Image: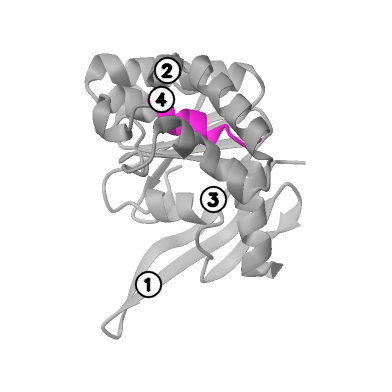
Amino acid sequence: MSLIETRDLVKIYRLDGVEVPALRGISLKIDIGEYVSIMGPSGSGKSTLMHILGCLDRPTSGKYYLDGLDISELDEDRLAEIRREKIGFVFQNFNLLPRITNIENVELPMTYAGVPSKERRKRAMALLERVGLSHRAFHRPTEISGGEAQRVAIARALANDPAIILADEPTGNLDTRTGREIMNLFEELNSEGRTVIVVTHDPEVSAKTKRIIRIRDGMLEK
């Protein structure tokens, strides 16, 4: 059984009374432990697809099965639980809270999961060490470089030990060398058994993954 399976996903946005199709019948499968990129130009629908795969949005029609669960049948509380337990998110703009320290940012998902404070702090420090940033634990995101901020974001994504890492343009705000370091880190996480899905428009990024799913105009390219 596939970890992720979609069947004829359609997503239509309605803007000022006009229907704008973003996805036009996407059917795909991603197995446990795959390292996949979803690649397409701006406006292709790849970010819309990522939001649906990450249980951040729902399709207009079609089916999405995650680990055998029919996501369309679940309420918002259950979707939030799945995001918290199964998926770690990494975004282009890092999405770190600037007024708290890096270690507190990493602790946040564990706070929502009800992990006791001492265990949160211990696990967060271990994760920052894992990405080479334990020495920056008590700095704030505004006091570190973009590459360091993205590594903090990856540590945060790993906080609840998710099976899936879902990264949206994770190297988009980084220089080439730092971007390669981030992709190497994703490769390491995949080698440990995690399913890694990278959404990108960059051929150099997609070339690092083991399978490329190409999307254009809301449809998969054959």
Q: Dot 4 lies on which element?
A: helix
Q: Nearer the viewer, mark 1 or mark 4?
A: 4
First of labels 1, 3 by sequence position: 1
In the image, 78 versus 102, the foreground residue is 102
Q: Nearer the viewer, mark 2 or mark 3?
A: 2
- Horizontal relation, residue 44 to residue 54: left or right: left
Residue to which mark 1 is pinned: 13
Q: Quadrant of residue 34?
A: top right
Query: Residue at left 54%, top 37%?
Result: 107
Q: Dot 1 lies on which element?
A: strand
Q: Decide: marks 1, 3 in contact (CB < 8 A)?
A: no
Residue to which mark 2 is pinned: 133
Whether 164 is drawn above or below 128: the answer is: below
Task: Give the x, y percent position of residue 188.
Answer: 54, 15
In the image, 177 versus 39, the foreground residue is 177
Task: Give the x, y percent position of residue 39.
Answer: 38, 38
Q: Measure the C-alpha gap from mark 4 to mark 2.
A: 8 Å
Residue to which mark 3 is pinned: 54
Residue 151, labelled with which disc?
4
**In the image, is residue 58 part of the stretch drawn in magenta?**
no
Inspect the image, locate mark 2, and give the three-letter code of the amino acid beneath it. Leu
Inspect the image, locate mark 4, and give the three-letter code of the amino acid beneath it. Arg
The magenta segment is: 151-163
Q: Dot 3 lies on which element?
A: loop
Can residue 206 be seen here? The reply is: no
